[in-house]
Amino acid sequence: MPISKPHSTLGAGNTGSCSALVNYLDKENRELEKLINKHNSLQEIRDFQNRRQDFFNHDKSDIGLLEVIDGIDRNKRKLGKNDSKYFAPTISFSQKELKHLISLSTEKTEIDDVWQLNPKELEIYNEHLKNYVKKAMDNYAINFNRQSKGLQTGRDLVYYAKIEHFRKFKGTDSEVMQGLFKNGDYKPGLNSHAHVIVSRKDKTQRLKLDPTTKERSTQRTIGGNSYQVGFDRAKWIDKNETTFDNLFNYQRMERERFKNQNILKNGTPKEKDLLTQEINKIEKNKKFVLNNGAKKEQGQLIKKTNSQELNEENKEIEREPKIEKVRSRTRLRF
């Protein structure tokens, strides 16, 4: 399932400027600049430049670093010195989900790396990812339950997102500790994911929004005004999973679903056992339906083929007297 983690930040404080985080998230573009400087071919340079990933949001694409920093740092009305000014959610995908998006972006098969996509295919692939991130930020806004206060969609937030296609091994990864890879090596396979920087305040700067709060959904009343607070992180992940499936027509296996994964990881032995039995039953029924569907389709294809062959035979039979008649006339002319 797409995993959406609403981090407070990525290893740095979030009570001041977001400039350090914004510059950190430009790392892949800096790597591309190094590659550009090593090549002389205009075509290769152009290809590397087309692979740059800039920030985007609901309203704009190709947003530069300074605009991101300015947009977040200025959106902090009535926030104290020690208050969080922004948060840094990440959105990650499974290999199966990424391969599905690849299949929607190219007719090529066995794509294991984004470098195998040509510029046009990569552009389509990136658009799929960007559209999904925008939908996930719609869900983010809705999950605060502040619709009555004007927080309806991601367009009511101040956020900037960025797609990345690579991940590197860390010294603590098991593959590094086993000596299979070195710290800093690129991880193989498809590793596309998204980073988001989202302001603590909404676009009107009237609402404080904290996705890391322990409260999921609480009704509060201050000065006669009633309002909702809280953020249900599990609900956000579950909603994002449904959005992915609907947006890309992804046929998710029961074992992949977030709610089931959560039980299989954190449930009691009895809960795990009951769920495993239920999943096996559902998947067995799905397999039966798919097999029957395939057989039915094959039968219809055979029937159609036989019908076409019979029609051809009938046409041939009808054609023979006409041919003979033409031959007879031809013989008469001579």
Image: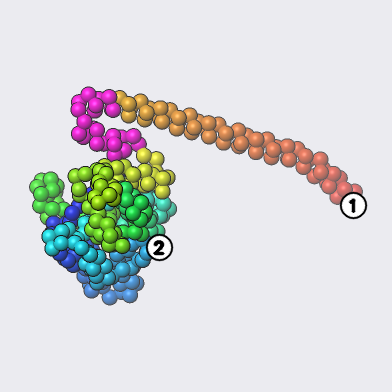
Residue 277, image quadrant? top left
Residue at the image point whose x is 23% and y is 74% from the top: 37
> Does residue 213 appear to the left or right of 156 in the view shown?
left
The residue carrying pointer 2 sits among few (fewer than 14), some (14 to 19) or many (20 or more) residues within 10 Å by Cα, namely few
Number of labels in the image equals 2
The span shown in magenta is: 253-276
For marks 2 and 1, give the CA distance.
64 Å
Across and down, in percent, residue 40 comes to: 28, 75
User: Does residue 2 sit above or below 70 in this rendering?
Assistant: above
Whether 131 is among the magenta residues is no
Residue tagged 1: 333
Across and down, in percent, residue 49 comes to: 31, 70
Across and down, in percent, residue 17 comes to: 17, 66
Name the foreground residue: 218 vs 45: 218
Query: Is residue 41 something one can see in this rendering?
Result: yes
Residue at the image point whose x is 32% and y is 26% from the top: 278
Predominant secondary structure in magenta? helix
Whether 255 is among the magenta residues is yes
Name the foreground residue: 92 vs 22: 22
User: Does residue 185 sit above or below 29 in this rendering?
Assistant: above
- Of mark 2 and mark 1, the one earlier in the sequence is 2
